[in-house]
Amino acid sequence: MNPKPTLRDKKKEATAHALAEAAFKLALEQGMDGFIVEDVVQQAGFSRRTFANYFSCKEEAVAAYFIGSASNEDETLLFADLPPDATPLDALYSLLKMQFTSEFLYKLRQFVSLANQYPSLEPYILSVFRRLQMAAQEVLEKFSHGRYSEGYTHLLAGAVYGAFVPILDGRLNVLLPGEAPDDRSGAMSFDQYLNSMFGYLHNGF
């Protein structure tokens, strides 16, 4: 069980978030080449030294905005909504519905779009998905209580989270939650894609 965050922990978390949010906004407005760390600290209201306590570069600060959004979910709430005969796949489906809100997916797509323009951000996309995948695997292991091998939970989480990359980089014609249909023909909704993907997993491809 994780210890309860102290006031000091909360203050550090708020500082890191403020710096990351400032970096993200500057990246969207000016591009990664259009600002420097000094611009980030001025916008967030902190010193350059404070920035250095949290991040090694502006790319890491931009990525932290999204990595911070990949927070741990309320496992008690998640498990309470599952039927007694639920499988790890059912648990993962419920987790995804909780994690991948329309706001989070929209921000994540913005991040992927930035990374496509600025290769220095690309390695951080993997950090976001790794964080999500590891959190999902921890949930699956707690849910399964040793009934399934560790390799199975690794494979399941890897297959599911890997399937989201082509949505976010635009290779698949999928509308995110809250996104209105546009001129793209044949676009499917996010829920349709999610249900289709889990249909394949349920049927063993």
Image (tube, rainbow, N blue to C red):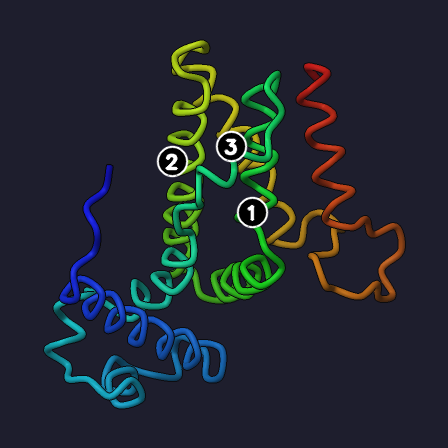
x and y, in percent, of residue 73 in the image: 44, 45
* Element under disc 2: helix
Compared with 29, 176 (above or below) is: above
**Residue 23 picture location, percent across and down:** 35, 76
- Name the residue type under label 1: Met
Near mark 3 (Cα within 10 A), the count class, few <14, some 14-19 or many ≥20, is some
- Asked if residue 68 is positioned above or below residue 149 in the image, the reply reads below
Say which amino acid is labelled 2.
Met
Depth order, front residue of 104/33: 104
Which residue is more in the foreground, 88 or 81?
A: 81
Q: Position of residue 115 (x, y in %)?
A: 47, 61
Q: Residues within 10 Å of mark 1 (few under 14, many from 20)?
A: few
**Secondary structure found at label 3:** helix
Indicate which disc, 2 or 1, sits on the residue closer to the N terminus: 1
Instruction: Classify residue 65 as left or right of residue 49.
Output: right
Disc 1: which residue: 98
Camera-near label (2 vs 3) is 3
Q: Residue at x 22, y 65 (%)?
A: 10
Q: Disc number at residue 130? A: none
Which tag, 1 or 3, sits closer to the chain's start?
A: 3
Depth check, front residue: 48 or 9: 9
Would you name the residue on which mark 2 appears?
134
Is 119 displayed left or right of 45 in the figure?
A: right
Instruction: Say if mark 2 contacts mark 3, CB within 8 Å.
Output: no
Which residue is tagged 3? 79
Q: Quadrant of residue 191?
A: top right
Structural distance between the alpha carbons of marks 2 and 3: 18 Å
Label 1, label 3: how many angstroms apart (C-alpha)?
A: 12 Å
Q: Label 3 sits on what residue type?
A: Phe
